[in-house]
Image (tube, grey):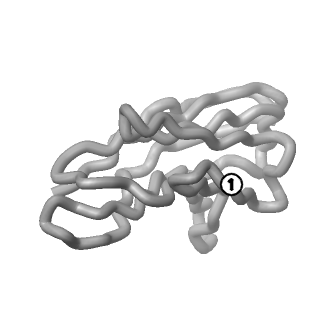
Amino acid sequence: QVQLVESGGGLVQAGGSLRLSCAASGSIFSINDMGWYRQAPGKQRELVARITSGNSTNYADSVKGRFTIFRDNAKNTVLLQMNSLKPEDTAVYYCNARVFTTDFLQRNYWGQGTQVTVSS
């Protein structure tokens, strides 16, 4: 089993910052790409940012220049630094990781989600 534990969500004013953290644990052999997705009420889940094992990154157009994704491979952790937050960023943010497990399976795992609310 693999578990992704997220933290760092909360309520902030527009223009403020938050840092989300996601730590993977369990039967992990290696972690390939990791990413953050978000889902607002009544809307589809969308990619926010992702990072590969080689530290190649990709961002949604709506967050480019404001968000930064990075990872600590030794701790199996991915972080998302969110600056200049807007009310439109309000959503539940989910961590995702593509994991090669000790059972020799490669699967996508999801965190439980953490609420980010940006007030105007």
- Residue placed most toward the observer, 13 or 51: 51
Nearest the viewer among 31 and 36 is 31
Residue 77, by quadrant, is top left
Residue 62 vertical position relative to residue 44 in the rendered view, above or below: above
Note whether 90 is above or below 48 in the view shown: above
Q: Residue at the location (77% across, 32% down)? A: 83
What residue lies at 66% left-to-right and 34% top-to-bottom? 81
* Residue 21 coordinates in the image, percent (x, y): 48, 35
Q: Is residue 36 visible?
A: no
Quarter-of-image position of residue 19: top right
Specify the quadrant that holds the C terminus. top right
| Residue 46, position as x, y percentages in the image | 63, 67
The residue identified by callout 1 is 57
- The amino acid beneath tag 1 is Thr
Could you tell me which residue is drawn at 74 percent across and 41 percent down? 67
Q: Where is the N terminus found, in terms of image quarters?
A: bottom left
Q: Viewer-proximal residue, 82 or 97?
A: 97
At mark 1, the secondary structure is strand
Could you tell me how many numbered marks the image carries?
1
Residue 108 location, quadrant: bottom left
Residue 4 position in % (x across, y down): 33, 48
Q: Is residue 36 above or below residue 83?
A: below
Q: Residues within 10 Å of mark 1 (few under 14, many from 20)?
A: some
Q: Is residue 48 visible?
A: yes
Q: Residue at x 18, y 47 (%)?
A: 26
Residue 42's spot in the image, x, y percent?
A: 60, 70
- Does residue 93 appear left or right of residue 12 in this picture? left
